[in-house]
Image (tube, coloured by chain):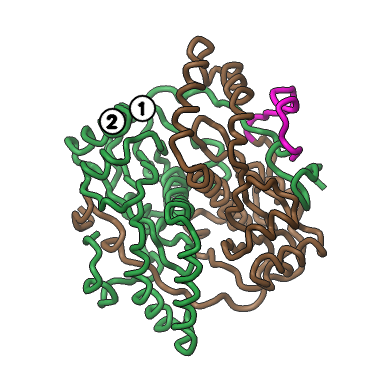
Chain colours: A green, B brown
Amino acid sequence: MKATTEDTLGKSGTFQDKPAQFPTTQINGAPLKPITQVLLDRRATPHFKSNPVPQEYLEAILHFAGQAPSGFNLQPWRFVVVRDREARHRLQKAALNQSKVSEAPVVIIAFAVKDEWKMRMDAIFDEGVRRGANDAGIVEMQKASATKFLGSFPPAVWLNRHTMIALTTMMLVAEAYGLDTAPMEGFDADAVRREFSLPLESEVIALLAIGFGKGPDKAYGGRLVLNEFVSKEHYGGPWTGQ
Amino acid sequence: MKATTEDTLGKSGTFQDKPAQFPTTQINGAPLKPITQVLLDRRATPHFKSNPVPQEYLEAILHFAGQAPSGFNLQPWRFVVVRDREARHRLQKAALNQSKVSEAPVVIIAFAVKDEWKMRMDAIFDEGVRRGANDAGIVEMQKASATKFLGSFPPAVWLNRHTMIALTTMMLVAEAYGLDTAPMEGFDADAVRREFSLPLESEVIALLAIGFGKGPDKAYGGRLVLNEFVSKEHYGGPWTGQ
């Protein structure tokens, strides 16, 4: 992306439609994995082979991430795609020296820039009016309402909330295409900002390694039963399944 | 879920394996939608029919949400499933009076309880040791490391980050099963806590309505082109597709 400045926004070419072309099979030619199989197979991959992620797959993963929903359609997620070998080694150093960061052919830095939405809002709402998603008659009122709402949050909370929708989407699309992934939150945010020229006011949210797993996965650690995290009708109402 | 107390944890029945039984077709009998189609079709649904979500589908959606990855496998997401008609009307009042909240047959309140991970950690790490995911010899060191790491965050940031992985999973699984959804962040968190007996120290993160959409979707508002949210190798490095 370009460093965001007000005069690059709202020009032609800023917005696009839903993806029209994307791979419709796994990389090995097999049918896409159903999401149920994706969720059974997905593990935080400990090691990666060096095989690259085909360009058309990476593009599709990014395009689909961009289709995530967001409050007022403000799309606050930002990604730096790191593939250069030297850059992956620098990222590894900033990420607790985890070897998978330099092993994986693609590592995506997911971040968001505090208050950037204030610069984006006019262009996004105006595009909404052009497409019939916003009503020209009340769009100024909607902007005021959005500004008030967003001002009521600690910025980091709202940015994490939304960026993780796009990151999760990316992770699951990658897995459906037959790739392996590893989401990570162990890193020195200051070092990531410095090494990858992120704005000082950015919130570094997660890393996502994408590639082809090498060697065995870590053992599955189990999950809480539904009664431990789901209630019925009110907190503490036992989830009995009915 | 039961209100969490230390003596309910780590007992038999707290943990489970991956889901073994779940619906393998859409509700109407058609094959599951591939995730690419899910992401093209998914919209924030403005209105819902009253038709219920079949129990086995709702259970599967919740089970798959629970498979989401989390830091140290701590699984901080908590859900209240609201189906009772009167409860949905109370939730609507706490959620800017959005009519879809009482229209949808299921609305899930996604939240997390600050510092609850401190009570869960021993049971989760011990289960990890039983399953071979943690090494008994270093598990105390791992707990100390996790405690230090989690203490370095504003709790709301970490809880939003993780709960949104599970919420996004839930949304996409529901859509793959042929359901419609609407994620919402417009609500009065104090009112939601009060009306649904959530702990005072809980972070209310999002609502997710699930059901069958009624009437036309809102027009698609467009999305930023990749160059507006993706950089190559460093912030500002134009994403040229190569």
The furthest residue to the bottom: A137
Left/right placement of residue A69 relative to residue A58 reads right
Local secondary structure at mark 1: loop
Query: How many marks on residues?
Result: 2
- Quadrant location of the N terminus of chain A in the rendered image: bottom left
Image vertical order of residue A86 relative to residue A123, above or below: above
Image vertical order of residue A57 relative to residue A21, above or below: above
Image vertical order of residue A51 relative to residue B12, above or below: below
* Residue A47: numbered disc: 1
What is the x, y in percent for residue B204? Answer: 61, 53
Provide the residue designation for mark 2.
A103
Q: Nearer the viewer, residue B86 or B196?
A: B196
Local secondary structure at mark 2: helix
Q: Nearer the viewer, residue A117 or B225?
A: A117
- Hey, what amino acid is under mark 2? Glu
Contact check, label 2 and label 1, Cβ < 8 Å = yes
How far apart are the two marked residues, 2 and 1, measured between alpha carbons? 7 Å
For image coordinates 51% across by 14% down, the residue present is B135
Would you call the spot at circle 2 few (<14 residues within 10 Å), some (14-19), or many (20 or more)?
A: many
For image coordinates 59% across by 30% down, the residue present is B118
Left/right placement of residue B239 relative to residue B92 reads left
Q: Which residues are magenta?
A: B1-18
